[in-house]
């Protein structure tokens, strides 16, 4: 499937003044007709201030209502619109077209679903294997004894120890950029380890040993090959590879 989509002149969608025409190549997949999977091209007007998500919404609203993708907040908070844009995992709502456009030249941008998870339709993947790994590391505060009569106090220094990994929005960009995860989906993956890190180094938590034991298994942190794909892909700027190395170090020193 490589055909471009043309709209009849009588129903031509709006073209904003000053926009540049861009070709968007989308990898399409329909579970009802899997043999027809392939690339489909659309010509879309773009302004430098547009987000890539705007162009997908334009396609769906004006050119092809069957195009399927996830989106919600459109502000880089929910993480639902993770996809591979020009071969790199990104959030569509955080990619500005000014970073793609070249003056005087019509460009082509490719978009496809993130790898390593089953594709349900077009750019939508089944996130359940990803969330299974997230739940497996027990990403919640574990304490014992009676409930406190006030909030659990923590110093700014103690909070700073794990502050970076609290930023995760569970978009799966890091995990599905990992070559190890592509090859073997049983690997916990970077996002699960990042969320374990967030509690392992929390001074209020008592479950660090249990989480470290979970991540010490065959599908845990030792599968990481330090390619830094995950760090590059994170839309929140989390030092993912660094967090994984810190969990490895904690395991070594806990023996």
Image (cartoon, rainbow, N blue to C red):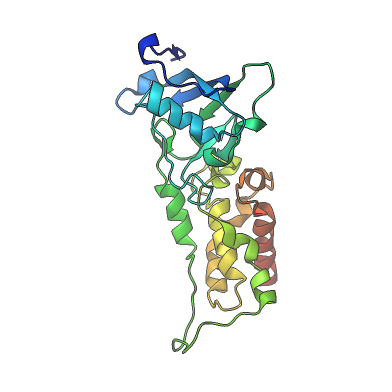
- Left or right? Give the position of 40 relative to 212: left
Q: Is residue 9 left or right of residue 228?
A: left
Q: Residue 67 in the image: state x and y as whole percent.
A: 39, 28
Q: Residue 207: x, y in percent?
A: 53, 74
Q: Nearer the viewer, residue 82 or 136?
A: 82
Rendered position, 46 above or below 236: above
Please tell me whether residue 4 is drawn above or below residue 203 in the rendered image.
above
Residue placed furthest toward the left = 32
**Residue at the spot 44% in from the left edge and 32% down from the top edge:** 57
Quarter-of-image position of residue 65: top left
Q: Can residue 21 be seen in this snapshot?
A: yes
Residue at image position (49%, 44%) is 74
Residue 198 location (% of width, % of height): 58, 65
Quadrant where the N terminus is found in the figure? top left
Query: Is 222 situated above or below 54?
Result: below
Q: Residue furthest top?
A: 9
């Amino acid at each position: 499937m490589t055909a471009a989509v043309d709209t009849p002149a009588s129903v031509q969608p709006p073209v904003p003044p000053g926009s540049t025409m861009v070709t968007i190549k989308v990898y399409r997949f329909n579970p009802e007709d899997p043999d027809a999977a392939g690339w489909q091209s659309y010509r879309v007007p773009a302004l430098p201030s547009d987000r890539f998500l705007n162009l997908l919404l334009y396609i769906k609203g004006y050119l092809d209502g069957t195009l399927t993708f996830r989106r919600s907040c459109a502000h880089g908070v929910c993480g639902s619109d993770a996809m591979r844009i020009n071969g790199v995992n990104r959030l569509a709502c955080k990619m500005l077209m000014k970073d793609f456009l070249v003056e005087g030249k019509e460009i082509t941008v490719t978009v496809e679903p993130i790898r390593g998870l089953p594709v349900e339709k077009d750019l939508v993947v089944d996130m359940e294997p990803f969330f299974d790994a997230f739940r497996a590391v027990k990403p919640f505060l574990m304490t014992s004894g009676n409930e406190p009569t006030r909030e659990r106090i923590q110093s700014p220094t103690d909070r700073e120890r794990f502050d970076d990994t609290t930023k995760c929005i569970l978009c799966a960009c890091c995990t599905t950029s990992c070559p190890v995860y592509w090859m073997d989906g049983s690997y916990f993956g970077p996002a699960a380890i990042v969320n374990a890190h967030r509690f392992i180094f929390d001074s209020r938590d008592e479950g660090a040993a249990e989480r470290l034991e979970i991540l010490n298994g065959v599908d845990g942190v030792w599968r990481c090959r330090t390619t830094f794909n995950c760090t590059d892909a994170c839309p929140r700027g989390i030092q993912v590879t660094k967090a994984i190395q810190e969990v490895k170090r904690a395991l070594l020193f806990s023996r």
